[in-house]
Image (cartoon, rainbow, N blue to C red):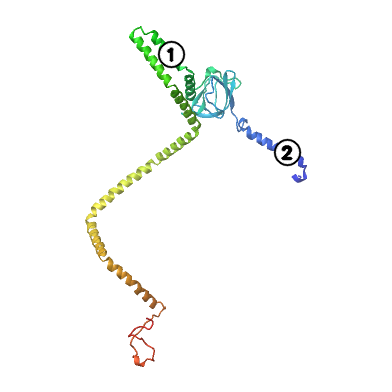
């Protein structure tokens, strides 16, 4: 067998490019392969997408069995394609877009009913699908509708009705007057109401954008609570042991109180004595230091020590100029 260096480099390069392209294609379309990806793709028609996006989970009885692969517009309907693996979808199955969190997370819920399997080539009709109520869109729609109301014209119309029914019964007149006051109040607060609804929509949108952070926070909180619950027995044992230790210490102090009181009294007396003689102790310590320094110098010659004997030889026997000049003192002093 010839080595690669002996073969045609152009042919080797082309084979390498084909292998790289094949590996890239297998990696990119791995979800569509029958062995490592697999699953059956279905299509369902909805009246609205309700914020559903490709990549959202598909669940049966709360268990993830696949994911949404596409959300496209099909005329006056929305076509949602989804892939299901290792799960049966019947020919009477219903599909619903549902919220899995208050922050706007969506998933596709499939109720697999029907005596026969669902044909993947036949879309699930609108009669067997449903969409959730979107609070964010509702608030936005209310804000837009209120902004289109001519509050001045509405107030003038109700005031005209009130004037027209001025001669009617008092109850009708009061009702119309109340409607006029209500219209006037709404007209004066129109900007505030519109701003409030707009701010509510912004808050809802922000919470929806940060749902991953809130999910992580809630998940971490669940883990913390689970760990605390798992450690509940240990924490309970620690608290019980601490309580028993406190009881034992209290009993020990109560039993030994007769012995501890004289000891503490004597210790207080010793402390008072040391405090009264603090000046003498300080002076003694200042004198002990030089003494032990000189003693260390005298005994610092191994097995010998330095001594000085004064007056052993009479001064008359000493040569002139030797011996202490002022009494029996060391010449080195």
Q: Residue at x 29, y 68 (%)?
A: 281
> Label 1 crowding class (10 Å Cα cut-off): few <14, some 14-19, many 20+?
some
Q: In the picture shown, does residue 318 fall above or below 69? A: below
Q: In the picture shown, does residue 270 fall above or below 5? A: below
Q: Quadrant of the N terminus?
A: top right
- Are the residues flagged by discs 1 and 2 in contact, CB closer than 8 Å? no
Q: Residue at x 35, y 71 (%)?
A: 289
Q: Residue at x 34, y 7 (%)?
A: 169
Q: In the picture shown, does residue 172 fall above or below 299? A: above
Q: Is residue 249 left or right of residue 52?
A: left
Residue beneath label 1, please? 156
Residue 3 can be seen in this image? no
Element under disc 1:
helix
Residue 114 lies, in percent from the top left, at 53, 19
Q: Is residue 223 left or right of residue 27?
A: left
Q: Residue at x 40, y 40 (%)?
A: 228
Label 1, label 2: how many angstroms apart (C-alpha)?
Answer: 83 Å
Residue 21 is labelled as none
For marks 1 and 2, give the one nearer the viewer: 1
Q: Camera-side residue: 326 or 251?
A: 326
Q: Camera-side residue: 95 or 213?
A: 213
Residue 15 is labelled as 2
Residue 160 lies, in percent from the top left, at 41, 10
Residue 117 lies, in percent from the top left, at 56, 21
Residue 284 can be seen in this image? yes
């Amino acid at each position: 067998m010839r080595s690669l260096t002996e073969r045609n480099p152009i042919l080797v390069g082309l084979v390498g490019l084909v292998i790289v392209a094949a590996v890239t294609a297998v990696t990119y379309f791995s979800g569509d392969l029958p062995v490592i990806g697999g699953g059956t793709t279905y299509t369902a028609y909805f009246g609205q997408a309700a914020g559903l996006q490709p990549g959202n989970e598909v669940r049966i009885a709360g268990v993830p069995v696949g994911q949404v692969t596409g959300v496209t517009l099909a005329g006056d309907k929305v076509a949602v394609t989804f892939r299901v693996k290792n799960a049966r979808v019947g020919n009477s199955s219903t599909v619903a877009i549902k919220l899995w969190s208050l922050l706007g997370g969506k998933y596709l819920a499939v109720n697999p009913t029907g005596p026969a399997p669902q044909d993947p080539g036949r879309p699930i009709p609108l009669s067997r699908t449903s969409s959730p109520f979107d609070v964010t869109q509702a608030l936005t729609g209310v804000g837009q509708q209120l902004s289109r109301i001519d509050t001045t014209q509405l107030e003038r119309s109700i005031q005209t009705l009130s004037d027209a029914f001025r001669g009617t019964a008092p109850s009708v007149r009061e009702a119309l007057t109340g409607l006029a006051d209500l219209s006037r109040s709404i007209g004066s607060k129109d900007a505030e109401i519109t701003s409030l609804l707009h701010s509510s929509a912004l808050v809802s949108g922000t919470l929806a954008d940060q749902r991953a952070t809130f999910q992580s926070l809630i998940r971490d909180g669940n883990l913390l609570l689970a760990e605390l619950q798992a450690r509940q027995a240990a924490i309970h044992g620690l608290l019980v042991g601490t309580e028993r230790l406190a009881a034992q210490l209290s009993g020990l102090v109560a039993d030994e109180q007769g012995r501890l009181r004289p000891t503490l009294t004597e210790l207080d007396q010793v402390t008072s004595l040391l405090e009264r003689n603090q000046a003498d102790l300080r002076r003694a310590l200042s004198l002990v230091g030089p003494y032990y320094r000189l003693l260390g110098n005298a005994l610092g010659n191994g097995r010998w020590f330095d001594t000085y004997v004064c007056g052993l030889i009479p001064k008359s026997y000493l040569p002139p100029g030797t011996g202490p000049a002022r009494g029996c003192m060391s010449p080195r002093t």
